[in-house]
Amino acid sequence: MNSNTPTLVSISDACERLSVCRATIYRLIKSGQLDTVSIGASRRIRSESLEQLIANGAEKTAA
């Protein structure tokens, strides 16, 4: 994998990482807060998008 290739995580992995249910992940996707890539019938979340959501949440909590 080259360094320009985005790292992708599954919906299940994102749920575990954020400690939320699948419905919450799908809401975040629908609202545009998480970027996804479709590969065949599966959907993956760009890890950069997940990291940004976590960082933004941490900033709001700290404010």
Image (spheres, rainbow, N blue to C red):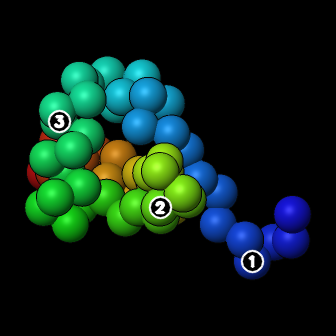
The first of marks 3 and 2 along the sequence is 3
The quadrant of the picture occupied by the N terminus is: bottom right
Residue 63 shows in this picture: yes
Viewer-nearest of discs 2 and 1? 2
The first of marks 2 and 1 along the sequence is 1
Please tell me whether residue 33 is drawn above or below residue 25 in the rendered image. Answer: below
- In the displayed structure image, the side of residue 37 where residue 63 appears, left or right: left
Which residue is rendered at x = 65% and y = 57% of the image? 7
Q: Residue furthest front?
A: 41
The first of marks 3 and 1 along the sequence is 1
User: What's the amino acid at mark 2?
Assistant: Ser
User: What's the amino acid at mark 1?
Assistant: Asn
Circle 3 residues within 10 Å: few <14, some 14–19, many ≥20? few
Q: Label 2 vs label 1: CA separation?
A: 18 Å
Element marked by disc 2:
strand
Q: Label 3 vs label 1: CA separation?
A: 29 Å
- The x, y position of residue 9, in whole percent, is 55, 44
Q: Which mark, residue 24? A: 3
Q: Nearer the viewer, residue 36 or 52?
A: 36
Residue 14 shows in this picture: no
Residue that mark 1 sits on = 4
Q: Nearer the viewer, residue 56 or 30?
A: 30
Element marked by disc 3:
helix
Q: Label 3 vs label 2: CA separation?
A: 18 Å
Residue that mark 2 sits on = 38
- The x, y position of residue 57, in whole percent, is 23, 47
